[in-house]
Amino acid sequence: MAGGDGYRVPVAKGSGLGVRGWLLLGLITVVVLAAAGVWNPFPGMWEWVNRRQPISEPDVAWQQRIGGTPRSVTIAGEAVVIEQRTRVEARSLAAGTQLWERKADWSAVTGAGPEAVVVVGRLLVKGYEVLDPTTGVTRRRDGDAVAVWTYRNLLLDARCVAATDCTLSAWDPRGTAPLWTAFLPGVSAGLFADNPNLLGTRRLTTARVDGEVAGPEAVPPLLGFPVDGRVHVVDTATGRVLQNVEPGRDERLTVVGGRLLRITARSQDGNCYFAISGRDSATGQEAWQQAGINLRTADSAGCVQREDPYGARNVLLGVSPDGREAVLDSYDGRLLLVAANGERVLAVDDRYAVVRAADGATVSARELGSGRVRWKRPVGEKAGAALTPYAAIVADQKPNRLVALDPRTGRELAMLRTSANALAVGPAGMVIGEGREIGYLRFGGTGADPAGGDNGSNGTAPGAGNTPAPQDSCGPKNELCAAPDPGK
């Protein structure tokens, strides 16, 4: 405004509090009210920020947030055992509540059902402890072992008093005295902690399904221990060291399904030529031979074999001379399945193979030996699959789905709309997880198809009583399996 002498009187700008000032004043007021106990909005705000988002649709039976991303998850009886980087914990299978927690660098589950136990240890420290999965109580303690191997029906450990003087011992999962012991002239430098690699098969893996989703397998009849460039073949029933073999220049040795396999890869005319010989474990005599099957043990440079073959239990997966994938019986060398051109085997055990069609639009379960299609269902082109003792898992993308199926009939045990991974499968359900969130889904509770249809459903209404029985190993001679069902 102008004064009488012509000068303007300056007006101060920003004399109000402004937006930032009012926000600061409001925050100070809330802090004062909270400190006085009049009104505290912070717990509710934190609960809103940290609230649980359902991990799947339909929702799981329970969902919990754990302290870190799990390295492995295994169902052990009525507990879920979760291995993390520096600790292991167990949660109730029924409710997801924490049962116990221990510091440990590694852990593994041995045994099955009510006989299951948890083995834990520290890296670079000898020994291990055997814990009850429900209570965490130590059942047995060992102070000398350098490595352990865990199976559904056996625990093996190795201890060495000198570099060339080691003892391999077998234990019942809940036993207190070894079933047998065997002498080994040392162990490989890489054999330490839990389940170090032996000479066997590599598992097929797929995205969104953990490689250990099936839990511990039944112990094979023979195991191959690599020691100083040689293979020591151990009979797991008696502990006898049956053979001590050195591979030839072009050979890779592996032990699968009761046989010592000699896999030869010879370079000629710019190609690799393969031959497989199955040897009797007691005499070392050749029991069968197959030529031309590529077991994917060699890389492209000079046919050097650096990998074990793909397979599971008593079967091997390779490529026939005409480029089709083939499943081979490791005990007698029979071709159990030869896929059509363009088909791909996604998962295999010693009874079934899950095969994706050449056009990628469907997956089907094939019965090994007969080739019979047990079930078929439509999938996306990037779908993966896994076989476990209790369910076949199909992981689909765009849209994201996890589907659990009866391996024999294809009946839906569960169908989830989720981006989570399948972490573990048990007799009555499976554990899924995404980041630090894990949840348990009971089979028969969601997504079943009681009306049947293209998925091969037998029309039975879903429920816990319809959960399939475990499909354990039939043994190398099929001696452990019951008579075939009438539908075969």
Image: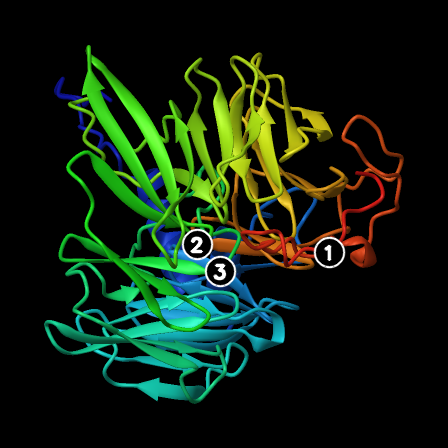
Q: Earlier in the sequence, mark 1 or mark 3?
A: 3
Q: Residue at x 48, y 85 (%)?
A: 175
| Residue 54 drawn above or below residue 166 | above
Using the image, determine if residue 311 lies above or below residue 284. Answer: above
Label number found at residue 216? 3
Where does label 2 land, which residue?
436
Q: Is residue 185 left or right of residue 311?
A: left
Instruction: Compute the Cα span from label 2 to label 3.
Output: 23 Å
Residue density around tag 2, few if under 14, some if 14–19, many if 20 or more, within 10 Å: few
Residue at image mark 1: 482
Numbered disc in front, either 1 or 3: 1
Outermost residue, left side: 163
Of 75 and 388, which appears nearest the observer? 388
Q: In the rendered image, is residue 148 in sight?
A: yes
**How far apart in space, not on screen, are marks 1 and 3 (Cα)?**
22 Å
Circle nearer the viewer, 2 or 3 = 3
Left or right, residue 72 beside residue 115: left
The residue drawn where x is 21% and y is 78% is: 126
Q: Amino acid at mark 1?
A: Ala
Q: Based on the displayed image, in which of its 4 quarters is residue 51 positioned?
A: bottom right
Where residue 442 appears, as percent x and y from the top left, is 70, 56
| Residue 82 sits above or below residue 144 on the image | above
Residue 154 placed where, x, y %? 47, 71
Q: Amino acid at mark 3?
A: Pro
Whole-angstrom CA distance, mark 2 to mark 1, is 41 Å
- Confirm whether residue 17 shows in the render: no
Residue 11: x and y in percent read 22, 30
Q: Residue at (41%, 30%) from the top-left corner?
A: 290
